[in-house]
Amino acid sequence: MNRIMLLQAAGAIMAAMLLCAALLLPRLRRIERMQARIATLRGLGNQNQLEPAPWPQRAARAVGQAVLASGIVKGETLAELQRTVMAAGFRGSRAVAVFIGTKVMLMVGLPFIALPLSSVMGPMGRNLLVAGAAVAGLVLPDMALRRLREMHAKQVERGLADALDLMVICAEAGLPLEAAVERVSIEMAEANRAVATEFGNVGTELRILSDRRQALQNMGDRTGLDSLRRLGGTLAQTLQYGTPLAQALRTLATELRHETLMRFEARAARLPALLTMPTIAFILPCIFLIVGGPAVLRVLDIASRP
């Protein structure tokens, strides 16, 4: 009886989700076409943006848009989710909708996958397995997003010093700030995609926003990295006080490389402590065997004599 009621509830949820997706999908398609046209007119669209998304992504986005339209997620929760998604390298409201839709679809889909596996269990084990699958569907997207955020932050930190060196070259060549940022985003596309994406977003905001200092401050707010916050503050002070851009960027690049070297030295200093347990577990027994083995064999030989 519990299994039948669970199947009925899951079927009702799936039917409601499919109905919401069917109602919102035509509107989403119209919005996508309008956004693609606007991006093309602004010169911000590329071939990858105009290609249709895979059907799982479209389905997740439709479900996520239905959840957002219902008003379940609001206020600070939605703002924090948007900051987390942006810090992972994803931009726009679509990314938030896809993330929420993925959580909902996994929460509903994983219990259906777990039901055949729970046929050999008792009622208590079956209920626990289904509930655990639903909880896993809610938790796994958060874990994946957190991992992607850490990877994106590491990539940005790894390539930021090189990007600043390119900005120094552009500034010394006479390019203004907007042109220098755009040139760095183009040149870093092959070497470090994360840095190129961040600088591309900054270049876009510098063209669109009326306050350029706000665009530079958003650079650090999107990722939460202290290095990008310092870069945004340095560029904002350069614009405000008219200090030489190349000199400020060169000083900041030197500081970032020095901090990277200090992190490497700190990791190297931890190696002796990390190697203590492998040394005790694998090397010392071999030394004891080599040193004490002959003596033990000699004692056994003497003891075995009549």
Image: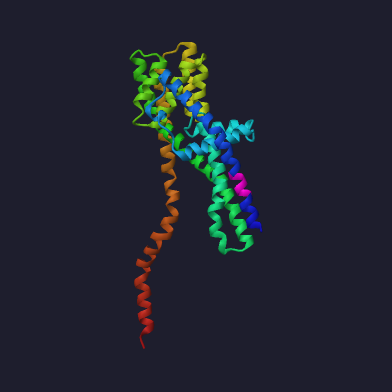
Quarter that holds the C terminus: bottom left
**Residue 21, horizontal then vertical, whole percent:** 55, 37
Residue 224 can be seen in this image: no
Q: Residue at x 58, y 35 (%)?
A: 66
Total of numbered circles in the picture? Answer: 0
From what the image shows, is residue 228 above or below residue 122?
Answer: above
Q: Is residue 12 magenta?
A: yes
| Quadrant placement of the N terminus | bottom right
Which residue is nearer to you in this view: 187 or 98?
98
In the image, taking residue 167 as reference, residue 212 lies left or right, namely right
Give yes or no for residue 5 being in the magenta stretch: no
Where does residue 257 sit, x and y in percent of width and height? 40, 30
Viewer can see residue 70: yes
Q: Quadrant of residue 249?
A: top left
Image colouring: rainbow
Q: Image height check: is 190 above or below 127?
A: above
Taking the spot 64% from the left edge, 60% from the top edge, the residue there is 124
Name the dominant secondary structure of the magenta segment: helix
Q: Residue furthest top?
A: 242
Q: Which residues are magenta?
A: 9-14
